[in-house]
Amino acid sequence: MSVLQRDAGELRLEGVRLSDIAREFGTPCYVYSRAAIESAFRAFDEGLAAIDHLVCYAVKANSNLAILDLLARLGAGFDIVSGGELARVLAAGGQASRVIFSGVGKSSGEIAGALEAGIRCFNVESEPELERIAAIAARVGKRAPVSLRINPDVDARTHPYISTGMAGNKFGIPHGRALEAYRHAARLPALRVTGIDCHIGSQILDTDPLDAALERVLELVDSLASEGIALEHVDLGGGFGIRYREEAPPDIGAYCRRLAARLHGRGYQVLLEPGRAIVGNAGVLLTRVEYLKTDKARRFAVVDASMSELIRPALYEAWHDIVAVREDAARERATYDVVGPVCESSDVLGSDRSLAVAPGDLLAILSAGAYGMAMASNYNSRPRPAEVLVDGARAHLVRSRETLASLFALEKRLAAT
């Protein structure tokens, strides 16, 4: 994280000391860098500058309104997977005409709401979904813009939980059925076929699978054109990986320039759906050490963050770097498992970490901007943390910490009998 630096042994995000943020807003606390988000978005946008394009931020990575607002101001489109995400985009000032709606389980209510809002298109994931969208569009007197998500059966070489483009995954229409699905969609008067979509997985570090998927998509585009089905856009998905530990993520600018050169002059707009690559390395999770505990040969640093705030290590065995906010050279380092207070053995944020810490110290869990707060829960009746956006020398509270009362505000006790 280039925006994270040490000054006299203390971590700063842009121009703000993380200890000051913890003092003002408490812990656990998510902290994001505006500069890092803007820089990551521009790598995509400027890399594709030579062709007509739209960079659609994947809202599921981090759906905070301030981040959506920031990206809307930069000209981003948005890739959504629920009606709730559409509502967030609109509340943040995003344009429905720049929204694409993905996801395998769109409800009738979500489809109707998206049609009413006037979204750019639906990324259709199955033939039954085509029928549902067509029926709803006909009922409300609209033509629904659709783009079929094709499963190209390409191995993204990533974690199996986040692989989406192989046969047997729940996502998309199999490549072998794609032509017939397009022919059927073109015959339905309530649908307007506008594009093609492909997304093969997440945390992709090798662009070869992306290139292979592109060629399979382009074969379909040419076959469709020969049958008179001309597409307005080609959506090549997202899934670009970031560095968490020792990974070597792709050079986004170089990849986008190469993609632009490959697709130049083909007459359609190119869409990408990055999420993690825009916000992942822009955020940290601040947490405070509550206890240091020894059990047989293992040492534990028990902190106030948990799998309720950051589930990725428990869910994917994901690795996040964990560092002290303030270094103390006089302290002796030891190896700790950094664990949270949730009553699950899987509540481990990091194992075998070399740290020089004492109770009360602050730790920063790095690369936590994507799939952190977005996947946070209230398990063990824990209020979800505050979120703060740093802009230069200023820190803005962009989501207040939940209160204990808010956890059960929507619940009711049984009536007296």
Image (cartoon, rainbow, N blue to C red):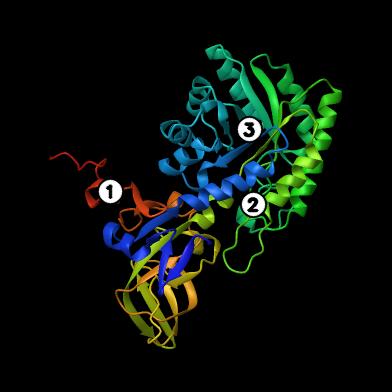
> Is label 2 in contact with label 1 (beta carbons under 8 Å)?
no
Q: Which residue is mark 2?
A: 240
Disc 2 from disc 1: Cα separation: 35 Å
Q: Residue at x 54, y 64 (%)?
A: 318
Q: Residues within 10 Å of mark 2 (few under 14, many from 20)?
A: many
Q: Pointers 3 and 2 in contact (CB under 8 A)? A: no
Q: Position of residue 416 (x, y in %)?
A: 13, 40
> Going by the image, does 325 lie left or right of 222?
left
SS for dot 1: helix
In the displayed structure, would residue 115 be above or below residue 53?
above
> Which residue has dot 3 on it?
123
Q: Whole-Å distance between the Cαs marked 3 and 2?
A: 19 Å
Q: Residue at x 65, y 50 (%)?
A: 201
Query: Which kind of residue does numbered mark 2 sit on?
Result: Phe
- Quadrant in which the C terminus is drawn: top left
- Relative vertical location of residue 238 with respect to residue 271 in this rendering, above or below: below
Label 3 SS = strand
Residue denoted by label 1: 407
Give the foreground label among 3 and 2: 2
